[in-house]
Amino acid sequence: MTPNRRRAARIASLMCLAVCIVASCADARVVHREPSLYQTVLVTERGATVCLQFEARTDKRNQSCVDRRRPRRMVLPYTRMLLGSLLLIPDPEHILVIGLGGGVLPTAFAELLPDARIDVVEIDPVVVAVAERFFGFDATERVRVFVSDARVFTRRARTRERRYDLVVLDAFGSEYIPEHLMTVEYFRETGDLLTARGVVAANTFQDSGLRDHESETWFQAFGPFIEFTRDVSLNRILLASAAPLPSASTVAERARSWRRRMEPYGVSIVEFPRTLDRDPRWDRTREALTDQYSPANLLRSRR
């Protein structure tokens, strides 16, 4: 198959997946609706699956989902993909998660890494309350929640010299990532929070008007990075490290060591290494996003 045909097939697959997601959302029953200062927060139910959505205009996408029959199993592919960050640092002691959603990811980290301390930053107190009420999320002494804008939290954490072994950026709104959380300046501030072996992972879109800009921004902030995509998801995960990136053989060995522990979460982690792109391509002539140039509205223009 030629590169153009492969790209066309991939786009068709992603379009089909998008249609399925929209259909799934349409079939769900709204069991809770609550406005906040930032959005309308929805909780939907479809069979045993409960999902969190942020309502904006007519566009609704699932942000977090839990299967009540198997509460550990990660329903949404992107949450499973974010656990791939543990292939770069398998034993983080201090973790920072930007964006709570339903609390699926910090809950999994807490279970998988019983000695780790996890800080979660969420700007919307309504999201925190909904995560606790409908998704079984519990803040503990080990899993702390800070209701704050991520940029403000990051700057204060730098001043207080907090350091993290793993930082996960998952601050999706209903349609886009807030523009002040997609700039070189913010990513460099985030990099200042990393320990000498620290890893940063970000959840973003596979295909959007900002993809090249975002890749250039990430490169200018962190240097060489890994791009992680899978055909089952519209998302892509970007991974960078303060230390040299581990070898392919090390990553594969770590995947095998995680295999059994990941099974209850539905994460086929042994399949991840072969889809980690260590040499992602993008248009290097595109401008990096900065605090002065950050047209996040372009993200709405899907290719």
Image (cartoon, rainbow, N blue to C red):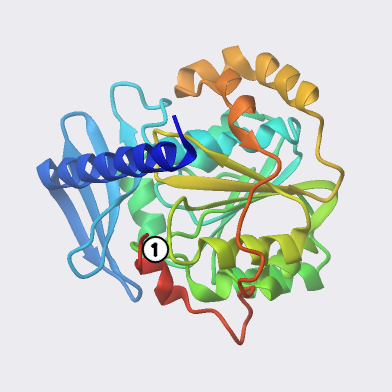
Tell me where residue 288 appears, x and y as whole percent.
64, 73
Looking at the picture, tell me which residue is in the foreground, 262 or 300. Answer: 300
Please tell me whether mark 1 sits on a helix, a strand or a loop. loop
Tell me where residue 54 appears, x and y as whole percent.
29, 60
The 10 Å Cα crowd at callout 1, few under 14, some 14 to 19, many 20 or more, is: some
Tell me where residue 14 appears, x and y as whole percent.
33, 42
View extreme (bottom): residue: 292
How many labels sit on residues? 1
Please name the amino acid that badge 1 sits on: Gly
Residue at the spot 79% in from the left edge and 55% down from the top edge: 194
Asked whether, in this view, residue 71 is left or right of residue 152, the answer is left
Residue at the spot 54% in from the left edge and 79% down from the top edge: 294
Location of residue 102 with respect to 258 vertically, above or below: below
Looking at the picture, tell me which residue is in the foreground, 236 or 209. Answer: 209
Is residue 166 among what the camera can see? no
Question: For mark 1, what is the residue?
Answer: 173
Residue at the spot 74% in from the left edge and 65% down from the top edge: 221
Asked whether, in this view, residue 71 is left or right of residue 21, the answer is right
- For the N terminus, give its image quadrant: top left
Asked whether, in this view, residue 27 is left or right of residue 221, the answer is left
